Amino acid sequence: MAAAAADRGRGLHETMRCAPSTRRFTGEPVPREALERALDVARFAPSGGNRQGWRVIVIADPGTRVRLRELYERPWEEYLERTGGRAALDAGEASGLPAGRLASLRAADEYAHTFDLAPVHLLACVDLSALAITDAQLPRQSIVGGASIYPFVQNLLLALRHEGLGASFTTLLVPAEEALRELLSIPDGFAVAGHISVGRRADPWPRRLSRRPVAEFTFGERFGRPW
């Protein structure tokens, strides 16, 4: 409890610099009050027309969590085969992958097969009628609809970190939307936008995450021109 209180005292910038994906959880229960506080602040996220189309299903039932793991494992294994990740995991250090990348891949694989051990799962759904798809006519895949749901998801991830809770966001359950619809009574007109595992982090919190410097992704006046 003292650690959670200390995390709630962190500043916004510090929280944003250290909100990693958590893939190993303790068995400690997640206080309902912490979830309520996180959801309460996350709801102030922007959305198209302020329609607030998000809906969240809080899942703690052990049997349902096992079923979610089963639904997650298949697309995870397909992803590993498609990207060469399974071969890299089998080869270990001989794969030639950087040590950090190999460690991350191993952690993600462990997470997939212990998915149900996270004490709480949050399934983020969105009302499709609340999305303004302004890029539908462009000759590429649409991405704009996510602007009305993923700011809420990011708010929620930061709020959970502020509560001292570990979390991991993934979209690998989305292909199982029809099975999820039946399992969780999701009505027509709503889509699964992603999933967040929540619990007490089993590993120490890193001091700060590693990310590209601003100069590598920020341009001035034209794409590629230094700012």
Image (spheres, grey):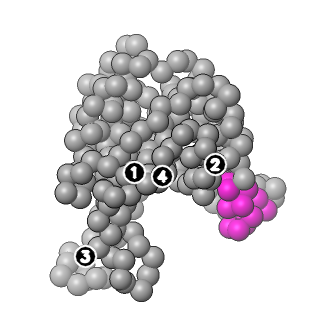
- Where residue 138 appears, as percent x and y from the top left, is 37, 84
Q: Nearer the viewer, mark 1 or mark 3?
A: 1
Identify the mark at residue 32; answer none if there is no mark.
Answer: none
- Asked whether disc 4 touches disc 1, contact meaning CB atoms under 8 Å apart, the reply is no
First in sequence: mark 3 or mark 4?
4
Distance Cα–Cα, label 2 vs label 3: 43 Å
Residue at 38% of width from left, 33% of height from top?
160
Q: Is residue 111 left or right of residue 54?
A: right
The first of marks 2 and 4 along the sequence is 2
Q: Which mark is residue 126?
A: 1
Point out the frontmost of discs 2 and 4.
4
Quarter of the image where one finds residue 85: bottom right
Cβ atoms under marks 2 and 3 closer than 8 Å: no
Structural distance between the alpha carbons of marks 2 and 4: 13 Å
Q: Which residue is mark 4?
A: 188
- When the figure is inspected, residue 58 is found, relative to residue 193, above or below; the finding is above
Look at the numbered discs 3 and 4 and tell me whether their residues touch, using CB distance below 8 Å.
no
| Circle 2: element type | helix
Q: Residue at x 38, y 42 (%)?
A: 55
What is the spatial separation of the Cα atoms under label 3 and label 4, in whole angstroms? Answer: 42 Å
Q: Is residue 202 visible?
A: no
Q: Which residue is mark 2?
A: 179
Identify the residue position indicated by label 3 in the image: 219
Say left or right for 171 vs 39. right
Residue drawn 19% across and 57% down? Answer: 49
Up/down of 69 relative to 139, above or below: above
Q: Position of residue 123 (x, y in %)?
A: 49, 41
Instruction: Name the residue type under label 2.
Output: Ala
Start-end of magenta stretch: 75-87
- The answer to which of marks 2 and 3 sits earlier in the sequence is 2
Amino acid type at circle 3 is: Phe
